[in-house]
Image: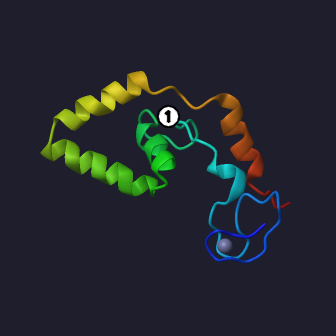
Amino acid sequence: MYCNYCGKVIQDDANLCAYCGRRVGAVAARKHLVRSRRDRKVAGVCAGLAEYLDLDVTLVRVLTVVLSIIWAPLLIAYVVMWIVVPEEPLRLADQVSIQVPEHS
Ligand SMILES: [Zn+2]
């Protein structure tokens, strides 16, 4: 198949383009908004949002803290998301940790 972004030929079962690094193919499946288990500071809301919106997690955290100081209802929104948004399933976190290459 071809990469939609750079047009180069890539493997049919590839999730990432080897040339430009963009997500292709199967990963386009619908993502679910979940609270992250592996990359959390408080409740995993910011990490989950960053993952869902494909943004940098630090940017989301800084914006959340700064905007909460300026506009307090955002803090309530955070608590509501803490309650409403489900935690990332355990097996999903396990898969991610398996993908990390170990050099021995
Ligand atoms: Zn590409």
* Colour scheme: rainbow
Q: Residue shown at 41%/23% (left/top)?
A: 84
Q: Position of residue 31 (x, y in %)?
A: 57, 41
Name which quarter of the figure residue 38 lies in: top right
The residue nearer to you, when weighing 30 against 53, is 30
> What's the residue at 73%, 71% (across, down)?
18
Q: Secondary structure at mark 1?
A: loop
Residue at the location (58% across, 32% down)? Answer: 88
The residue drawn where x is 64% and y is 77% is: 6
Q: Quadrant of the C terminus?
A: bottom right
Looking at the image, the residue that sits furthest to the top is 83
Foreground: 98 or 28?
28
Number of callouts in the render? 1
The picture places residue 23, in percent across and down from the top left corner, at: 64, 60
Does the beta carbon of the residue at mark 1 sit less than 8 Å from ligand 1?
no
Q: Is residue 63 left or right of residue 100?
A: left
Q: Where is residue 36 drawn, in percent x and y?
A: 53, 38
* Residue 8 spot, x, y in % from top left: 73, 77
Compared with residue 22, is residue 95 higher up or lower down, i.e. above or below? above
Task: Say above or below: 17 vs 53.
Answer: below
Ligand 1 appears in which quadrant? Answer: bottom right
Horizontal placement of 63 versus 98: left or right? Answer: left
Q: Is residue 89 above or below residue 96?
A: above
Residue that badge 1 annotates: 35
Q: Nearer the viewer, residue 6 or 90?
A: 6
Name the kind of residue labelled 1 in the image: Arg
Task: Quadrant for the N terminus, please.
Answer: bottom right
Res 7 → quadrant = bottom right
Q: Say few, some or many: other residues with alpha carbon within 10 Å of mark 1 (under 14 / 14 to 19 / 20 or more).
A: many
